[in-house]
Image (cartoon, grey):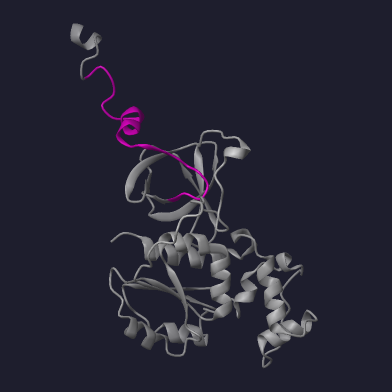
Amino acid sequence: MERRRRGGILSGPVDGPERARAAYPDVEATAGLRVVHRATGMRGAVIRVERDAAVLRTPTGGERLFRLAPGAFSVDGRVVSLVRPQPTSASSAPARTASGSVSVGPAPAKVARASRILVEGIHDAALVERVWGDDLRVEGIVVERLDGLDDVAGVVRAFAPTAGRRLGILVDHLVPGSKEARLVAEVTHPHVLVTGTPYVDVWQAVRPHVVGIEAWPVVPKGRPWKEGICAALDEDHPGALWRRILASVESYADLEPSFVGAVESLIDFLTEEG
C-alpha cells in the first residue's frame, strides 16, 4: 500500500490519453500540411483547425472534419498527434503556395522523379503549373502533354510503369459513356492512376465568377466548344480569352473542387511511399 501511494506502476492509468500523448510526437496542424487520417485512410491537406478537430481538403476537393485524437494521423509515414497551431503574428505566419501548401521559399527544384503526370493539352498543363507549380518542383514531378487520348493505352505501355515509376493521367470530360471514358477504360495497371473532371474543356475548371461571368455559356452540340465560348463572351480569338482566364486564377480556391481533387489525388499517388 505504501508503494502504491508513492506512485508505483499501478498508481495511474496504464492506457488512456496521457499515455497516448506520450507515445506519439505532436505536430502542429498548420494549413497546407498533408496528412493521413489513420482510422479511415483519408488523405488530405489541413485547411484549418476548429475547436478540437482538423478540417482537411479531401482528394475530391471537399472538406471533412476529423477529431484531434492522440495518434489519429500520420505525416510522411510517421504516426503523430496533430495539435492546434501556436498563435503567430501576421508577419511570422508561413507563406503559402497557390495550392495552399506551406511555401519552402526559393528552394531549387528537386531532381525529377521517374514518375510523371500526363495531361491532355497545353491549357491543362498551364493551369496545373499555375496552381501546383511550386509543389511539383519541390516534389520533383514533371507534367507532360498527351495532346489527345486516342493512344493513351499505347502511351502507358511505352512508359512501362513500375512501383518506382508511376504514372498519373488527368482527363477532361471523364463521364460515363464519353469517348474519354472508353479510352481510359483500356488502362488497367496497378501503378497508373487516372483521374478526371466532368468538364468538356479545362477552361470550365475555373469558377465562372473568377472570370467575371455568372456561368459558362452552353454551346450547342456540333459547334466547337471553344469557338462557341468565344462567340458567347464576345472574344475573337481563343488564345486571348485563355490568357484572360489563366491570369484570373490566383489559387486553388479559384478552381472547381473536382479539378482540385483530381490533381491532388495524382500528386498524392506519385509521392506516396511504397
Identify which residue, 113 or 198, lies in the foreground. 113
Q: Residue at x 61, y 39 (%)?
A: 91
Q: Nearer the viewer, residue 91 or 116?
A: 91
Number of marks in the image? Answer: 0
In the picture, the quarter occupied by the N terminus is: top left
Segment colored magenta: 10-34
Residue 51 x/y as whole percent: 54, 36
Query: Residue 24 in magenta?
Result: yes
Task: Give the residue displayed 62% in from the left and 38% down from the top.
Answer: 90
- In this view, the residue in front, 142 or 224, is 142
Decide: is 76 above or below 147: above
- Lateral position of residue 80 relative to residue 127, left or right: left
Image quadrant assignment for residue 151: bottom left
Q: Quadrant of the C terminus?
A: bottom left
Residue found at the far bottom of this picture: 222
- Residue extending furthest right? 234
The reply to whether residue 198 is in sight is: no
In this picture, is 214 found above or below 135?
Answer: below
Query: Is 68 colored magenta in this rendering?
Result: no
Residue at 52% over, 63% down = 132
